[in-house]
Every structure is written in C-alpha cells, then in structure tokens.
Image (cartoon, helix red, strand yellow):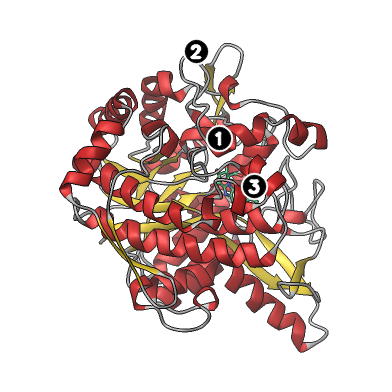
Amino acid sequence: MFLDEKFLFGFSESGFQFEMGLPGSEDPNSDWWIWVHDRDNVFAGIVSGDYPENGAGYWDLYKIDHGIACFLGMRIARLGIEWSRIFPKPTLDVKVNVSIDESGDIVSIDISHKAIEELDKLANKQAVSRYMEIFKHWKESCGEKLILNLYHWTMPTWLHDPIKVRNMGPEKAPAGWLSKTTIVEFAKFAAYIAYKFNEVVDAWSLMNEPNVVYMGGYMGTGFPPGIINSHYMLKAASNLLEACARAHDSIRLYSKKPIGLIHAIIWFEPHQVEKPEDLEAVDKAKTYWQLGFIDALTKGVSIFTGNVEKKHLKNKLEWLGVNYYSRHVVKYQDNALGYKPVHGYGFTCGSQVSRDGRPCSDIGWELYPEGLYYSLRELWTRYSLPILITENGIADANDSLRPRYIVSHLKAVHRAIREGIEVQGYLHWALTDNYEWSSGFRPRFGIVEVDYSTKKRLIRPSGLVFKEIAESGFSILDELEWGVGF
Ligand code: PGI
C-alpha cells in the first residue's frame, strides 16, 4: 500500500488561500497577489475586490487549526509551500546545466550541490523556518502523514507579471508558464525544497491542478493572465509538463519519498447524443482537461506532446491526487476545443437545483457523487496508480448540504475500494473557510467556519459528521441514507 495500511482521513490546504490574515503574514510577491489587487480587474468584475490579507490567518494560527483537525479525526494533511515566500527575489543567477533536445524541450537539468548552497543563501530564512515549524507541529501533534505540494497556482512576480503580460504581451513581460525560464526555476525550487524538507514529508505533490492553470489562465478570464488563446494554452500545458518532469528529477536528488500529481478531475458526460461528434466532444473534454496531462507524465505521449512519445516525460508519477467536486455535461461545439458545457448541470448548474433535480451549492455546483466513483474507476483502469482523494467539498455557508455531500462522496469512495481500486485516503476541502481566488471570501468551503473579523473558528455540524465517520470507519455509512444509488 502507498503511505499506510489503513484508510486515512484528513484535509488539504494551499498557502495563498489560508496563510494571510494577521499583520505580518502578507506575501505581496506572487502573481496572484498582483492579480487580485489590480484595480482594472476589480472594476471589470474579473476579481471580487476581496483581499487575501484579510483571510483565515493560518500562518499564525496553525496550531489552533491543527488542534481542530485532530479533534475531527484527521490524520493526514496536504499542505502547500509558497514559492514567492521562499524566493521573493530572483534565483536566475544560480547556474545549472540545462540540456535541450532538437525540438527545444528541456530534457534534463543538472543541479549541483553548489547550486543548492547558493539557493540557500538567497532563500528567505524566516519563511523556511516558519514552514518547518508548521510541518513539524502537524506531525508532532497528531498528524501521522504530510503531503507537501510544491505549486498551487501562485508564483513569484519576477517570473510572472500577469498584468504586464495582458497589457504588453508575453514577449515583453515575465510570462510565467509561457516561458521556458519558469521550468528551470521551478526545478531549482523543487530541488531546494526537497533538500530542506525531506525529513518531514511523507509524499510529494509536484503541482495542484496544472490543468486549471492552463485551461483557466488561457481559455478564460478569471485566472491570471486571463488571455483567451488556445495556442498559449497548449504552450503553457507543455511547459507545465516539462516543469513536472524536471521537478520530479530534482526531488529525487534529495528524497526517496513517493512523488505524485494532484489534478482537477471532472466527470464528463454527453448530453443527448444526436450525432457522433457529441460523443467525441466527451473524449475531447476529457483529454484536454485531465487525461492528456496524466498520459504524458505516465506513458510519455498525449495531445500535449503532439502525439509523439517523449521519453523525458515518462514514468514521473507514483501516485495520483484526485480533486473531485462535480461533473460537466457536454455537447459538440465548433470551437478550438470541440466541446461546450451544457448549462443547468454540474459546474454550470447555475441555480439551486439542476436540470436533473439534484441540489447545487452556493456557487452553483451540482452534487454528483457518482461522478467520483466513475472517475476513480476510469483512472485506476487507465493508470493503476494508487489514488488519494486530495480535495472534495462544497461551498455551503449554512451547512445544509455538506453532511449529505460528505456521506454520498465517501460512499462512492467505499464502493471503489470494495471493487479493488486502491484509494488510500480522503482529504476534505476545506478544513476552514478560505480565500476562493477570484471569488474572494463569499464561497464557504470550510467544515469549520471562520469569522474573518475576529479570526475565530467554529466547527460546523458537518464537522461532527466527518468526525464520526473518520473515527468509526466506512461501516457507519451503511446506516446513512444519502448515497444516490450506492
Ligand atoms: O473551488 C474550491 C477549490 C479551490 O479552493 C482550490 O484551491 C482548488 O484546488 N477547488 C475546486 C477545484 N479546484 C480547487 C475543482 C476544479 C475547478 C477549478 C476551477 C473547477 C471549476 C473551476
């Protein structure tokens, strides 16, 4: 078994969404900080006008949150580390040997120990030691396991300035994932973090949802840099792939712990199938959204490698993190991707009840637990990698749907396990309310409520449902009704 013999319950967090809140915890050095503070973005309604520095304050209050997590029966945490906190200033001058093949791909990066020592001089030592305190506190209080995720959508402004990219174009600004430089710097960052934190980490996650980064950033407007351009999307996806592969190699210089990828997994279904293109639309959506990326890092070939095998991308995953929330019902559309979501279902439910009569969350995401079971089955059949549910949860301020959400999704997980699918744990999103990117503080994903003015925490009733299941195991689920068919 990967990580443990027993099934693990826990929570997931990212840096940007939880850390800031109390004076001194601000991190103004990331692309997302610039993005959510940009006046034009606020004025255009692209971002909410809420600021992350008014958030939950985990940077200072982590001991309280760990205590609550323990009380709720949580034994595993997936935490993030903010690249911009560790390296607020450029690491570009630290020399490494980069090998490039005839197609321009970065196939290896040779990072010497001397380079690590130079990175150590540049690193913000206060941030390094605070992260070490947080991680050790989790492991020493009651957390048995820690997954450390290296990238959850934010990067230093010296590598990505999304406002300049939008205004002047990616050639004239630090261009983030549109630039090969970011791949090299990410590999250095990964090596440095493995060097510093290996002892407290049980498994590594290379990135959280690179698929949302390339789809959100270059096929929509809410994510930086908010440019709709399918060529940029493909370029960003292929650079993200190289970054994952090279970061994997970097981690292996200093750590033997399992390395995986956390991905946004949406269950795609056809609407009424009227023509063969409608079925192809489902395939296209799955490929662009999720399978294409994982295929490349396992088999070395996918749509993002131009359908040719790239050996330098192959066999880079030892486990898979599944972030599951809802489905998309899609149909054929003559656009760059070949599909569009049908409104009234899944992520585009748009109201309190879907066109299938199922309840939807405060932000209009439909409850569809079967989709988690179907996704687990598909991923297991295709990759045979051990799976962790690394996110699952609901924006539900008055906690009326969360108990049902948790129970029905755990039933889906239980069914998958009974059928022999290796699912090692369930990490809820989220332990506490947090900053929901462009949407600000309105969506309430916490199993624990946060009063943002006092920073006080209050366990929602669903927290006690979670605790009971985590402490007594899956058998208790049979006593509960919710399950939609399972
Ligand atoms: O929205 C809730 C959470 C975020 O707070 C996490 O940072 C992020 O990892 N969430 C939901 C998803 N991913 C995350 C699912 C994928 C998705 C992202 C954006 C679906 C629609 C839009």
Q: Tell me which numbered mark, 3 or 2, is placed earlier along the sequence.
A: 2
Q: Circle 1 sits on which residue?
A: 462
The percent coordinates of residue 409 (x first, y second) are 54, 54
In this view, 382 is above or below 394: below
Under 8 Å from ligand 1: the CB of mark 2?
no
The percent coordinates of residue 52 (x first, y second) are 59, 27
Q: Tell me which numbered mark, 1 or 2, is placed earlier along the sequence.
A: 2
The percent coordinates of residue 474 (x first, y second) are 42, 52
Q: Circle 3 sits on which residue?
A: 165
Q: What residue type is disc 2 on? A: Pro
Q: How many marks?
A: 3
Q: Is residue 451 left or right of residue 250?
A: right
Looking at the rendered image, the disc whose residue lies closer to the viewer, 3 or 2, is 3
Q: Which mark is residue 66?
A: none
**Helix, strand, or loop for circle 1?**
helix
Q: Local crowd at mark 3 within 10 Å, few (<14), some, or many (≥20)?
A: many
* Dots 1, 2 in contact, CB < 8 A: no
Q: Circle 2 sits on which residue?
A: 23
Looking at the rendered image, the disc whose residue lies closer to the viewer, 1 or 3, is 3
In front of the other: 160 or 246: 160
Spatial CA distance of label 1 from label 2 is 31 Å
Spatial CA distance of label 3 from label 2 is 30 Å
Q: Quadrant of the C terminus?
A: bottom right
The percent coordinates of residue 112 (x first, y second) are 19, 52
Q: Residue at x 73, y 42 (%)?
A: 363
Q: Is residue 114 left or right of residue 290?
A: left
